[in-house]
Image: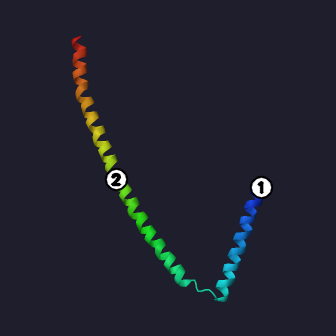
Amino acid sequence: MNESYKYGLYFVGGVALGALGAVMLGRGKFDIRPAMADLLSHGFDLKDKASAYAETVREHMEDIVAEAEHVHKQRKDAAEAAAPEAAAEAAKA
């Protein structure tokens, strides 16, 4: 069985399943409202957890950037302080 044939069967199966679900919902024989409400509430919980995790990651990244800027400034200040000394030693030679 080649790949395109297999994916075609998956597509046809998905369409048939979707059509069956639409017919069941249309006739009202399957009450899906409570299940959908529960599913959506779990989705909101997941969204809240993901947002909290993203906020934590953002705070950690801000801390790392602030530390890197501080180290960079210290290194730059040390290089500027050493530059006049190196120029004075070069002038003596």
* Position of the N terminus by quadrant: bottom right
Residue 87 horizontal side relative to residue 31, left or right = left
Residue 24 coordinates in the image, percent (x, y): 67, 84
For label 1, count other residues whose C-alpha is less than 10 Å away and answer few (under 14), some (14-19) or many (20+).
Answer: few
Residue 89 horizontal side relative to residue 14, left or right = left
Q: What residue is drawn where x is 47% and y is 73%?
A: 42
Which residue in the structure is indicated by mark 2? Answer: 60
Q: Check disc 2 and give the amino acid type.
A: His
Kindly report which numbered mark, 2 or 1, lies closer to the viewer in this rendering.
Answer: 1
Q: CA distance from mark 2 to mark 1?
A: 48 Å
Which residue in the structure is indicated by mark 1? Answer: 2
Determine whether 62 is above or below 12 in the image: above
Residue 77 coordinates in the image, percent (x, y): 25, 34
Residue 87 coordinates in the image, percent (x, y): 25, 19
Task: Please report contact status of discs 2 and 1: CB closer than 8 Å, yes or no.
Answer: no
* Position of the C terminus by quadrant: top left
Q: Check disc 1 and give the amino acid type.
A: Asn
Q: What residue is drawn where x is 70% and y is 79%?
A: 20
Residue 90 horizontal side relative to residue 62, left or right = left
Picture quadrant where residue 47 is located: bottom left
Q: Secondary structure at mark 2?
A: helix
Picture quadrant where residue 32 is located: bottom right
Tell me the tag on residue 91: none
Foreground pick, 87 / 46? 46
Foreground pick, 54 / 93? 54
Picture quadrant where residue 7 is located: bottom right
Q: Residue furthest top?
A: 93
Q: Earlier in the sequence, mark 2 or mark 1?
A: 1
